[in-house]
């Protein structure tokens, strides 16, 4: 049967198509190997990132005798929460928890409010000496007097061994101010203009227009600020040398991690501890694990909800101020 | 408006500049301990500022326990000192407020003048109180213990307050006949500035004022001393840095560690980019999302917690040891953390574990911004997967990489200290000691203030130079600045 010219042309086109699109439909062995390896490596790395937290957790809720024998490696057994309730009796730990929570809440709130206000003010062209003061502020990101001069400065101001050293120096955060400023500049200017034509003052515009519109960026810097406050450890170490009641939770954890194996005396110093509670937390290892867990839980709990903001944050960081 | 200004108004304006300057000065010595006029005896801490002595009575009397008990010093005279300091603080606050008001309209100015006048009277009364407290303390039965001393700055401060008083009085008289407006009003530019002012003050105090601490580099200072000119040693500590063999050895070792670890970091700074590229090669979106979520978690925990994680996995009774012991392979657990070998590599590994997932995010979003047509065109041309990765994705990411790389170069001396502090132990001290940690241990731990100030100073200067160098390089190569 003779093919028509049309059929011939079709076959030719088909052949050509198959030739050019070969790679799309046929996976070469190299490709398969690559894909498998890729998935494997990423799976392993992800496990390396999660497993330690899981391991820490199951060792704090499992039967303590088994934990001490080292038999709890993958599956928790003999579940109980005695370790956590026992920690409530450690006096200086609850103090440290309170200090950390207070500084996180207060420090973050003040920082966010200050960043919002300053970010707004530096967009106002009519401010006296705006350019100069903005540079005066931003340039501090690029130099640092050094840890000792800063320490001596705090000492001079009477801020050492004081709770306020956690809060006050962090209120003005130049980087966050840049982020807010950039964000405000992206808001259509008409909104502000029409409000000011209606006679609104700068403060009213800030409260009624800028603040609500900036909520996404403010949430982002709030999250970063809160994580920073919660994790900060060196400021407690440097400034609180003779005020152990103001140590942050991270600093306490650091001290416990460096203490020798048995922390029984610690429990006793915390006040009345029942015999049963004492027995359940005989080992320093379990105490260390449990305190670590208490310290990390807030981050792990907050993280899934806040991940979006974290990622937005790093992208905003890529935008120059 | 300027043309219609009378001589009176001009004089008033000039006088305002003077008052504002004087008020600024008094605010400064409110916070500077060296200028504290309330330090009337040696029992008062020399690091106490006027502000602290007026606000915190317990701090003021911290060293007076014995003196009160033995009757060397009357409780009432120190209370008088406290009240006087408090009054001066309030007076200075009033002056500062009136200084701000002087930027407003005539009604504001008038009110400000009166407040300023009252404030300066209160301040002078406070100075009188301090003087009386001094007289009482000076009459102590134990001058050797109490060390009564007339505060060096007393007359200087008093003169400033008196000048403010006189100037305010003149202002009140000048403006007495001026007609005031109905409402309190101020030009927008000054109103905005006054809102900004508290934050400028914070920045000045916490970022600029520490630079004043660099003067310690030129003095023979020990913790608790006061600085005086007879302790001025010029560049002694700078030469110490290159002449004292023990210090030189330390510094060389520290620099070796700092630069070594920074270079490992720089040499592997492409890793987050590779992470992002390979992650995006995976077709399963859900899995990709999963990996991305969980590899960023370690970035948000502190270094103390990272150490705690290391402890639970690698210590004597940690995960690895208990697995091997239970399997009968090892007789007893090993503590990997106490092992002092390959410290640089280990520190890099922990840094990577903590940071790589997070650093990759910026590249991941850069990849999602690449035009898909580029890939389609490459496919038609017969490019394979790796060719596309190498010839399209990588070149598109290079600008981002370049900026981050330059920033890393600028930070080559600042590895931070948290990580090295928590992982430091007896076996790895010499190879883990980086510059930041060294300065901390020498300064805070051993109290060697001048030497560490020199090191901090040099480090800051080098960092700024590196930053500008990196910025210059960026401008030269890409025509864009990074700061």
Image: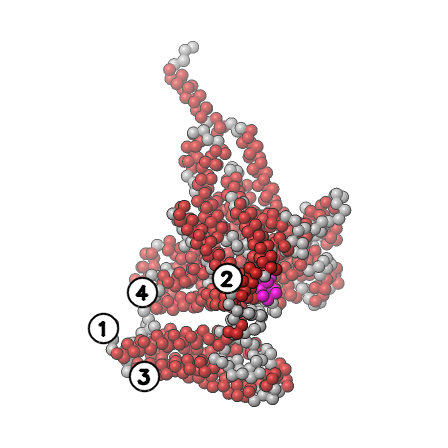
Q: CA distance from mark 3 to mark 4?
A: 36 Å
The chief SS type of the magenta part is helix
Q: CA distance from mark 4 to mark 1?
A: 30 Å
- Do marks 4 and 2 share a chain? no
Give the residue at x 48% y 36%.
B389
- Do marks 1 and 2 share a chain? yes
Q: Nearer the viewer, mark 4 or mark 2?
A: 2
Nearest to the observer: residue B6 or residue B264:
B264
- The image shows residue B256 at horizontal and vertical percentages of 57, 52
Q: Nearer the viewer, mark 1 or mark 2?
A: 2
Nearest to the observer: residue B240 or residue B433:
B240
- Which span of residues is magenta-colored? B440-448
The residue tagged 3 is B173
The residue tagged 2 is B457
Picture disc at residue B3 = 1
Give the residue at x 58% y 70%.
B223
Residue A117, quarter of the rendered image: bottom left
Q: CA distance from mark 1 to mark 2?
A: 51 Å
């Amino acid at each position: 049967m003779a093919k028509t010219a049309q059929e011939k042309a079709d076959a030719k086109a088909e052949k050509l198509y198959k030739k050019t699109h070969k790679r799309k439909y046929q996976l070469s062995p190299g490709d398969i190997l690559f894909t498998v390896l890729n998935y494997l490596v990423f799976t392993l790395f992800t496990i390396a990132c999660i497993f330690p937290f899981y391991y820490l957790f199951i060792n704090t809720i499992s039967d303590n005798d088994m934990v001490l024998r080292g038999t709890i490696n993958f599956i928790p057994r003999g579940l109980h929460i005695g370790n956590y309730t026992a920690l409530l009796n450690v006096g200086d730990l609850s103090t440290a928890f309170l200090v950390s929570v207070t500084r996180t809440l207060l420090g973050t709130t003040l920082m966010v409010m200050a960043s919002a206000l300053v970010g707004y003010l530096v967009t106002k062209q009519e401010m006296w000496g705006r350019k100069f003061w903005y540079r005066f502020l931003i340039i501090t990101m690029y130099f640092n007097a050094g840890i000792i001069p800063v320490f001596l400065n705090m000492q001079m101001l009477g801020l050492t061994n004081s709770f306020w050293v956690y809060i006050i120096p962090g209120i003005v955060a130049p980087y966050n101010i840049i982020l807010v400023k950039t964000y405000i500049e992206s808001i259509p200017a008409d909104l502000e203009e029409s409000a000011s034509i209606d006679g609104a003052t700068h403060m009213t515009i800030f409260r009624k227009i800028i603040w609500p519109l900036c909520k996404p960026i403010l949430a982002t810097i709030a999250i970063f600020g809160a994580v920073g406050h919660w994790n900060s450890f060196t400021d407690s170490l440097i400034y609180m040398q003779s005020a152990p009641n103001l140590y942050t939770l991270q600093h306490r954890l650091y001290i416990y991690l460096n203490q020798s194996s048995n922390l029984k005396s610690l429990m006793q110093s915390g006040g009345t501890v029942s015999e049963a509670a004492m027995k359940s937390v005989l080992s320093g290892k379990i105490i260390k694990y449990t305190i670590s867990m208490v310290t990390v839980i807030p981050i792990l709990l907050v993280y899934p909800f806040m991940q979006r903001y974290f990622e937005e944050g790093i992208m905003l960081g890529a935008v120059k101020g | 408006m300027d043309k219609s200004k009378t001589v009176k108004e001009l004089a008033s304006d000039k006088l305002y500049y003077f008052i504002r300057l004087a008020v600024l000065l008094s605010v400064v010595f409110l916070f500077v301990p060296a200028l504290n006029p309330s330090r009337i005896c040696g029992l008062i801490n020399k690091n106490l500022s006027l502000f602290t002595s007026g606000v915190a009575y317990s701090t003021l009397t911290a060293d007076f326990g014995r003196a009160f008990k033995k009757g060397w010093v009357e409780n009432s005279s120190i209370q008088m000192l406290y009240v006087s300091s408090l009054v001066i603080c309030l007076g200075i606050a009033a002056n500062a407020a009136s200084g701000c008001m002087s930027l407003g309209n005539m009604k504001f100015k008038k009110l400000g003048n009166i407040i300023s006048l009252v404030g300066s009277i209160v301040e002078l009364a406070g100075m009188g109180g301090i003087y009386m407290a001094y007289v009482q303390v000076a009459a102590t039965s134990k001058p050797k213990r109490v060390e009564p001393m007339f505060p060096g700055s007393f007359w200087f401060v008093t003169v400033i307050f008196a000048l403010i008083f006189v100037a305010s009085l003149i202002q009140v008289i000048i403006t007495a006949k001026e007609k005031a407006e109905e409402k309190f009003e101020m030009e927008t530019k000054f109103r905005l500035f006054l809102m900004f002012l508290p934050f400028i003050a914070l920045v000045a105090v916490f970022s600029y004022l520490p630079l004043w601490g660099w003067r310690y580099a030129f003095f023979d200072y020990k913790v608790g001393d006061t600085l005086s000119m007879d302790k001025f040693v010029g560049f002694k500590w700078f030469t110490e840095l290159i002449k004292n063999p023990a210090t030189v050895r330390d510094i060389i070792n520290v620099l070796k560690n700092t630069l070594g670890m920074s270079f490992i970091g720089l040499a592997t700074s492409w890793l987050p980019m590779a992470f992002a590229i390979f992650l995006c090669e995976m077709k399963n979106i859900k899995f990709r999302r999963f990996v991305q979520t969980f590899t960023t978690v370690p970035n948000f925990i502190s270094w103390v917690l990272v150490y705690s994680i290391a402890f639970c996995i690698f210590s004597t009774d940690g995960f690895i040891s208990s697995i091997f012991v239970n399997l009968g392979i090892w007789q007893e657990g090993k503590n990997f953390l106490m092992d002092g070998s390959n410290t640089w590599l280990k520190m890099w590994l922990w840094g990577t574990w903590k940071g790589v997932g997070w650093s990759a995010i910026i590249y991941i979003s850069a990849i999602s911004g690449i035009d898909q047509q580029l890939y389609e065109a490459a496919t038609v041309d017969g490019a394979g997967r790796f060719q596309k990765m190498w010839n399209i994705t990588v070149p598109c990411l290079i600008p981002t990489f370049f900026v981050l790389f330059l920033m890393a170069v600028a930070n080559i001396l600042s590895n931070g200290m948290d990580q090295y502090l928590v992982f430091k132990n007896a076996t790895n001290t010499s190879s883990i000691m980086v510059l930041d940690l060294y300065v901390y241990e020498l300064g805070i731990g051993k109290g060697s203030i001048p030497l560490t100030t020199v090191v901090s100073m040099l480090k800051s200067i080098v960092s700024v130079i590196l930053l500008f160098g990196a910025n210059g390089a960026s401008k030269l190569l890409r025509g864009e600045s990074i700061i």
